[in-house]
Amino acid sequence: MFFEISKIAGFLVSPVHMLVGLGFALTFWPQSGQRKGSLRVIQLLLGILLSLLVFPVGNELLVPLETRFPAPTKLPDQVDGIIVLGGAVDEVVSAGQGHLSFNEDAERVLAPISLLRRYPHARLVLTGGSGSLNPGPFKESDKVRPFWRDAAIDRGQVLYEEASRNTYENAIFTRDLVHPKPGEKWLLVTSAAHMPRSVGLFRKAGFDVIAYPVAFKSTGKNRQWYVPRTAGTALGNIESAVHEYVGLWVYHQSGRIDDLFPAPHAP
């Protein structure tokens, strides 16, 4: 039930959905004498929406998330395993086209190509079934497996965890699949903005990991003025950031992570 509620709530708390939904509701303002007031509010909502398109709001929201676990400047000499969180495949388009189609988080799947050349003896795990309320006819691994085989990194030794539907289940099911031993070093590959929540969940599961963030969407610095390239980029960045902040709060309130905003271990 937590999974279903989280998906529905995630849709409802989307800033764009809230603005458009409220504006639409105001068009049905019942008292004719208050139409002028409702028009003013609609104009205000449109102004807010326009500002989200013009100003780099998404960048400001993403920077704290993406810089919380910076890319490691020096990787370990030896790594025992590499965990890749699913979410890089566009399930709807892939199902419609009949072949693999990536979304903006494609680097999750691409990163192991270079990592396994550096660590040829490391175990590789892709974790994630379908994160959709209405799963399609295939799992993400069905499309990633042939891609990795063509890239010569899957020679039958890669593990595919296909039951998890969210990051909480990613952590639990992956731990139960690989049974990490004390002292082992595992890299966790996921999108930079998603890393704080992911690390917090893996730590709570008793699985200490080394953050290897990819798919950065911000400049890495606040107060950098620029106009987002497209409306989709501007709103998408805001959606991604809000999703993570809400997710951190919900997972902390439900006891799934110990810290509201997980951080790297003190040196």
Image (cartoon, helix red, strand yellow):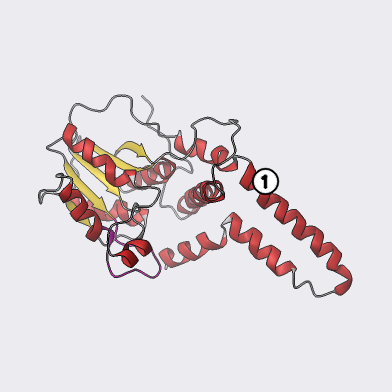
The answer to whether residue 218 is left or right of residue 119 is right
Crowd class of label 1 (few under 14; some 14 to 19; many from 20; radius 10 Å)? few
Relative to 141, residue 114 above or below: above
Kindly identify the residue that appears in the image at 43 percent across and 52 percent down. Answer: 255
The answer to whether residue 22 is left or right of residue 36 is left
In the rendered image, which residue does mark 1 sit on? 51
Quarter holding the C terminus is: top left
Amino acid type at mark 1: Ser
Residue 257 percent location from the top left of the image: 41, 48
Residue 94 percent location from the top left of the image: 32, 61
- Determine the residue located farthest toward the right in the rendered image: 33
In this rendered view, identify the residue nearer to me: 206 or 188.
188
Relative to 10, residue 195 above or below: above
Residue 221 percent location from the top left of the image: 52, 30
Q: Which residues are magenta?
A: 128-140
Kindly identify the residue that appears in the image at 49 percent across and 33 percent down. Answer: 219
In this rendered view, identify the residue nearer to me: 114 or 208.
114
Q: Quadrant of residue 190?
A: top left
Q: Is residue 45 magenta?
A: no
